[in-house]
Image: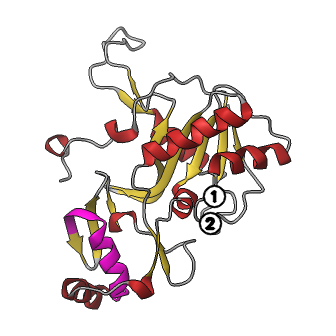
Amino acid sequence: MEIIAVENIPEIEENMDLGEIIVNAASKMGLELRDKDIIVVSHIIVSKAERRIVDLSDIEPSEFAKKIAEESGKDPRHIEVILRESKRIVRMRRGLIISETINRLICANSGVDLSNAGIGRAALLPLDPDDSARKIRNRIRELANVDVAVIISDTQGRPLRNGAVNIAIGCSGLEPLLDRRGEVDMYGRMLTSKIICVADELASAAELVIGQADEKTPVAVIRGYNYKSSETSAAVIPRREEDDLFL
């Protein structure tokens, strides 16, 4: 299996055609996209293209945001944006907010990111990452005549584990979960609970070549993994609240 960073991605601005940009960038580096390639795209460039960047100077913080900001030392405008992107607050301690976003992800700060958004600006998660992935995939198919899968990724922390990893917040063209229940192990014991989040593992693998500090390589191609093609969305990945031991 290969993981290839796609170079020559320009600074992304509003309404840019990400599918066309990815095809052109791959072509410039002599990388011919193939059927069954997996294109992993950092959400930051999707957010920029989809006008999900806010100027903090336009944000008027609420009294609640100001109170949290006093406790945490954070910019109250940043806190206000986090609160606006939250469907509900799951946990809050020492200024760290764990919330459920408006598209059902549970993560720190509603996924609102100050990194690589520009001075005085904040990046919000795409409103519908599955739709974003689908549009990029369709555009790549149209331009390059190849059927690929697309994953929109974001970096998130994990309960009881140090360090963050990339996860899939949107996908198109592959089955995000590999259900191995009913298979037997090497000793003949039947597996009863083994479900692998293939989309998250692929997103995490891509992070090894996708830039984090400067996002100059926000796209990667994973080649050689034999995934199951599917139109299932990444919405199946978050665990139901009643099944989550950490909530």
Q: Residue at x 56, y 60 (%)?
A: 49
Q: Indicate the amino acid at tag 2.
A: Glu
Q: Mark 2 points at which residue?
A: 13
Left or right: 87 with respect to 228? left
Number of residues whose C-alpha sits closer than 10 Å to that of mark 2, classed few (under 14), some (14–19) or many (20 or more) = some
Q: Position of residue 32 (x, y in %)?
A: 79, 35
Residue 81, magenta (yes or no): yes
**Residue at point 43%, 65% (across, down):** 124
The answer to whether residue 169 shows anywhere in this view is no
Mark linked to residue 242? none
- Which residue is denoted by mark 1 in the rendering? 16
Residue type at tag 1 = Met
Residue closest to the eye, 168 or 25: 25
Q: From this viewpoint, is residue 216 visible?
A: yes
Q: Which residue lies furthest to the top in this view?
A: 188
Task: Find residue 184 and report its image quarter.
Answer: top left
Residue at left offset 64%, top offset 63%? 12
Task: Tell me if 180 is positioned left or right of 27 in this view.
Answer: left
Residue 63 percent across, percent down from the top left: 20, 88
- Residue 80 vertical placement versus 134 (above, below): below
Residue lying furthest left? 242
Tell whether position 74 is magenta: yes
Which secondary structure, mark 1?
A: loop
- Tell me if mark 1 has few (under 14), some (14-19) or many (20+) residues whose alpha carbon lies within 10 angstroms of its own: some
Task: Kindly indicate the quadrant of the structure image that contains residue 178.
Answer: top left
The residue shown at (51%, 30%) is: 173
Highlighted magenta segment, given as a residue range = 73-91
Tag 2–tag 1 contact (CB < 8 Å) = yes
Please say if 222 is above or below 162. above
Between marks 2 and 1, how big is the CA–CA gap? 6 Å
